[in-house]
Amino acid sequence: MNENNDIEPQKPPVGNLVDFVYGVNETNPLHVEVAVDEKGRVVVFHDKPFRCDVNWYEYDVETSKLSFILEEGEIRNLAMTLEPIISKNMQNSHQILTILLDDETGEAKEGNYIPLIIHQS
């Protein structure tokens, strides 16, 4: 409760992205790269399969943080801050192309578009 005795909504806990990825260990880390062009087309590349689907992404312009929102609203943060140019180019995006790369060859194995919500102060 806050000072006005209002009940504050409970937010789901924020976890680490590797918590929902198969095959990650000390010798085989998860590699994630975010790319965006000047037209606002965003791509997230990752080299390990996710344990469950990403339902949508959320990007906070102020903090430059990208969150992966899973089933039932579970939140997983990307453990890095995105560059300011990405923030500038991402502001008109509504979806992210998410591509799973083959861990050994680096070739694209599968991809799909996932909705993106942009948060601005």
Image (cartoon, rainbow, N blue to C red):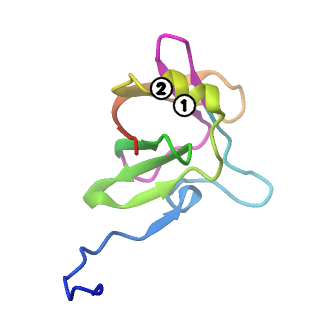
The chief SS type of the magenta part is loop
Q: Which mark is residue 90?
A: 2
Cα distance in 3D space between marks 2 and 1: 5 Å
Q: Are discs 2 and 1 less than 8 Å apart at CB?
A: yes
**Is any part of residue 109 visible from this angle?**
no
Question: What segment is highlighted magenta in the picture?
Answer: 34-53
Seen in the picture, residue 47 relative to 71 is either above or below; the reply is above
Say which amino acid is labelled 2: Met
Residue 38 magenta-drawn?
yes
- Near mark 1 (Cα within 10 A), the count class, few <14, some 14-19 or many ≥20, is many
Looking at this view, name the residue that lies furthest to the right.
27
Identify residue for label 1: 87
x%, y% of residue 117? 34, 38
Looking at this view, name the residue that lies furthest to the left.
6
121 left or right, relative to 35: left
Task: Name which residue lies at 38% across and 22% down.
Answer: 92
Seen in the picture, residue 40 relative to 48 is either above or below; the reply is above
x%, y% of residue 16? 56, 62
